Amino acid sequence: MRIGAMLGDISRSLFRRPVTERYPFERRPTPERLRGRLAFDPGRCTGCRICVRDCPARAIDLVVIDKAARRFVMRFASDRCTYCAQCVVSCRFDALGMSHEQWELASLDRGAFALTLGRPEDIEALGTP
Protein backbone atom coordinates (compact mmCIF):
# COMPACT_ATOMS: atom_id res chain seq x y z
CA MET A 1 0.00 0.00 0.00
CA ARG A 2 2.78 2.44 0.83
CA ILE A 3 4.67 1.73 -2.39
CA GLY A 4 1.54 2.45 -4.43
CA ALA A 5 1.05 5.81 -2.67
CA MET A 6 4.68 6.66 -3.20
CA LEU A 7 4.54 5.78 -6.92
CA GLY A 8 1.43 7.95 -7.26
CA ASP A 9 3.26 10.89 -5.69
CA ILE A 10 6.26 10.39 -7.95
CA SER A 11 4.15 10.23 -11.11
CA ARG A 12 2.25 13.42 -10.15
CA SER A 13 5.43 15.34 -9.38
CA LEU A 14 6.97 14.44 -12.74
CA PHE A 15 4.39 16.54 -14.57
CA ARG A 16 4.11 19.54 -12.19
CA ARG A 17 6.36 22.51 -11.72
CA PRO A 18 8.23 22.69 -8.40
CA VAL A 19 6.55 24.78 -5.72
CA THR A 20 9.81 25.99 -4.19
CA GLU A 21 11.09 29.49 -4.82
CA ARG A 22 14.51 30.33 -6.15
CA TYR A 23 15.05 32.68 -3.19
CA PRO A 24 18.41 34.33 -3.62
CA PHE A 25 17.87 34.74 -7.35
CA GLU A 26 14.17 35.65 -7.42
CA ARG A 27 12.97 37.83 -4.57
CA ARG A 28 9.50 38.85 -3.61
CA PRO A 29 8.85 42.41 -2.46
CA THR A 30 9.07 42.75 1.30
CA PRO A 31 6.01 43.84 3.29
CA GLU A 32 5.95 47.48 4.42
CA ARG A 33 5.48 46.49 8.08
CA LEU A 34 8.46 44.11 8.21
CA ARG A 35 10.85 44.99 11.04
CA GLY A 36 14.41 44.93 9.76
CA ARG A 37 17.54 46.85 10.65
CA LEU A 38 17.19 49.96 12.79
CA ALA A 39 17.40 53.26 10.89
CA PHE A 40 18.58 56.38 12.73
CA ASP A 41 18.10 59.99 11.57
CA PRO A 42 20.57 62.05 13.62
CA GLY A 43 19.08 65.34 12.34
CA ARG A 44 15.82 64.67 14.17
CA CYS A 45 17.34 63.31 17.39
CA THR A 46 17.26 65.60 20.44
CA GLY A 47 19.21 63.34 22.79
CA CYS A 48 16.33 62.66 25.17
CA ARG A 49 17.46 59.00 25.47
CA ILE A 50 13.91 57.65 25.81
CA CYS A 51 14.73 55.02 23.18
CA VAL A 52 17.66 53.80 25.28
CA ARG A 53 15.52 53.63 28.41
CA ASP A 54 12.62 51.81 26.74
CA CYS A 55 14.66 49.18 24.86
CA PRO A 56 13.88 45.86 26.62
CA ALA A 57 16.97 44.15 25.18
CA ARG A 58 19.36 47.03 25.99
CA ALA A 59 20.53 46.97 22.39
CA ILE A 60 20.77 50.77 21.97
CA ASP A 61 23.29 53.23 23.36
CA LEU A 62 23.22 56.93 22.50
CA VAL A 63 26.57 58.71 22.62
CA VAL A 64 26.38 62.48 23.01
CA ILE A 65 29.16 64.32 21.23
CA ASP A 66 27.77 67.85 21.58
CA LYS A 67 24.23 68.30 22.91
CA ALA A 68 24.06 72.02 22.09
CA ALA A 69 24.94 71.34 18.45
CA ARG A 70 22.70 68.21 18.43
CA ARG A 71 25.48 65.82 17.47
CA PHE A 72 24.70 62.25 18.47
CA VAL A 73 25.92 58.79 17.52
CA MET A 74 23.88 55.67 18.17
CA ARG A 75 25.47 52.30 18.88
CA PHE A 76 23.14 49.46 17.96
CA ALA A 77 23.78 45.82 18.87
CA SER A 78 21.67 43.97 16.32
CA ASP A 79 22.51 40.59 17.86
CA ARG A 80 20.79 41.62 21.10
CA CYS A 81 17.82 43.33 19.47
CA THR A 82 14.48 41.53 19.59
CA TYR A 83 13.06 43.74 16.80
CA CYS A 84 10.06 44.68 18.90
CA ALA A 85 10.20 48.30 17.64
CA GLN A 86 9.59 49.69 21.13
CA CYS A 87 12.33 52.27 20.53
CA VAL A 88 10.57 53.43 17.35
CA VAL A 89 7.25 53.78 19.18
CA SER A 90 8.89 55.65 22.08
CA CYS A 91 10.75 58.18 19.92
CA ARG A 92 8.65 61.33 19.86
CA PHE A 93 10.75 63.01 17.18
CA ASP A 94 10.66 60.22 14.52
CA ALA A 95 14.43 59.81 14.64
CA LEU A 96 14.16 56.01 14.62
CA GLY A 97 12.58 53.59 12.20
CA MET A 98 12.76 49.96 11.18
CA SER A 99 13.87 49.37 7.60
CA HIS A 100 11.75 46.89 5.69
CA GLU A 101 14.38 46.61 2.96
CA GLN A 102 17.38 45.58 5.10
CA TRP A 103 16.31 42.38 6.81
CA GLU A 104 18.96 39.85 5.78
CA LEU A 105 21.18 40.27 8.80
CA ALA A 106 22.97 36.93 9.10
CA SER A 107 26.76 36.97 9.41
CA LEU A 108 29.62 34.73 10.46
CA ASP A 109 31.52 37.62 12.06
CA ARG A 110 30.28 38.94 15.40
CA GLY A 111 31.66 42.39 14.61
CA ALA A 112 29.04 42.82 11.89
CA PHE A 113 26.33 42.96 14.55
CA ALA A 114 27.74 46.05 16.31
CA LEU A 115 26.58 49.03 14.26
CA THR A 116 27.45 52.67 14.75
CA LEU A 117 24.79 54.95 13.28
CA GLY A 118 24.97 58.69 12.73
CA ARG A 119 26.63 61.30 10.55
CA PRO A 120 30.01 60.19 9.15
CA GLU A 121 31.84 63.15 10.69
CA ASP A 122 30.32 62.42 14.11
CA ILE A 123 31.29 58.75 13.89
CA GLU A 124 34.81 59.77 12.93
CA ALA A 125 34.96 62.24 15.85
CA LEU A 126 33.91 59.44 18.16
CA GLY A 127 36.87 57.39 16.98
CA THR A 128 35.04 54.15 16.12
CA PRO A 129 35.30 52.40 12.77
Image: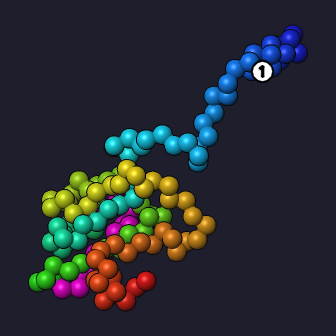
Residue at (88, 15) in percent of width and height: 3
Q: Residue at x 33, y 43 (%)?
A: 33
Side of 3 where 28 appears, left or right: left
Q: Which residues are magenta?
A: 54-66
**Helix, strand, or loop for circle 1?**
helix
Q: Residues within 10 Å of mark 1 (few under 14, many from 20)?
A: few
Q: Amino acid at mark 1?
A: Leu
* Residue 117 covered by magenta stretch: no
Query: Does residue 73 sit above or below 2 in this rendering?
Result: below
127, 89: nearer the viewer: 127
Q: Nearer the viewer, residue 15 or 90?
A: 15
Which residue is labeled 1 in the image? Answer: 14
x%, y% of residue 97?
Answer: 28, 57
Q: Position of residue 88 (x, y in %)?
A: 26, 56
The N terminus: image quadrant = top right
Residue nearest the observer in this picture, 68 or 10: 10
Residue 87 drawn above or below residue 10: below
Is residue 85 visible in the rendered image? The answer is yes
Counting every numbered tag in the picture gives 1
